Image (spheres, rainbow, N blue to C red):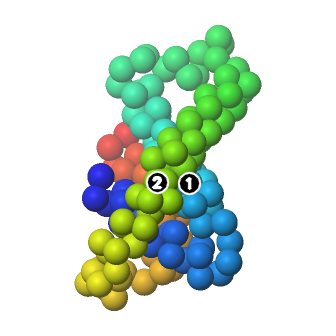
Amino acid sequence: MIIVDYIYYRLYRMYKKYNEPARFSSSLMFGMLGVISFFFVSIVLDKYLFEFYFLSKDYELIHAIITVSLIGITITIWIFLRYTPARTSDLLKKFKGSILNKIIPNWVIVALPLLEFLLGLLLLKTFL
């Protein structure tokens, strides 16, 4: 969970810098990351475990929309409730002088959904 804490910290700082609702925006970013992760995990599980359930006639587009929406909303709410203002202030103190702040630029943190998507495509192309 240290990685999640650090990513939340960086997102929070970045959104706060631009006067946006930092806690909510960071939670939405994690919801997006969760949806992208679910997309690739579901493809792998469908291929190896569930025998093409997602490609069957019983699975319609509305099922996919509902599933993805529920996962995104659940992760967003979970992150929003987990990182209370008190916990966020603790993280701000904990990671203030971290060496990773100088090594990892802000654009990498913002581009995490794109990087995760491209990495997922690369892994799918490699293993499927």
Q: Kindly identify the residue that appears in the image at 59 percent across and 82 percent down.
A: 17
* Front label number (2 vs 1): 2
User: Percent x, y for residue 60?
Assistant: 70, 20
Q: Amino acid at mark 2?
A: Tyr
Q: Which dot marks residue 47?
A: none
Q: Which residue is mark 1?
A: 27
Q: Is residue 2 above or below residue 104?
A: above
**Secondary element at image label 2:** loop
Q: Nearer the viewer, residue 33 or 28?
A: 28
Do the numbered discs 2 and 1 sit on residues whose CB atoms are within 8 Å?
yes
Residue farthest along the front direction in this orientation: 86
User: Percent x, y for residue 115?
Assistant: 47, 64
Sequence-earlier tag: 2 or 1 = 1
**Residue 67 lies in quadrant:** top right
Q: Is residue 90 above or below residue 58?
A: below
User: Percent x, y for residue 65?
Assistant: 69, 32
Q: Which residue is mark 2?
A: 83
Q: Nearer the viewer, residue 113 or 78?
A: 78
On the rendered structure, is 30 left or right of 65? left
Q: Nearer the viewer, residue 55 or 3?
A: 3
Q: Nearer the viewer, residue 121 or 33?
A: 33
User: Percent x, y for residue 13?
Assistant: 51, 76
Q: Amino acid at mark 1?
A: Ser
Q: Is residue 117 visible?
A: no
**Residue 59 lies in quadrant:** top right
Q: Kindly identify the residue that appears in the image at 68 percent across and 72 percent down.
A: 20
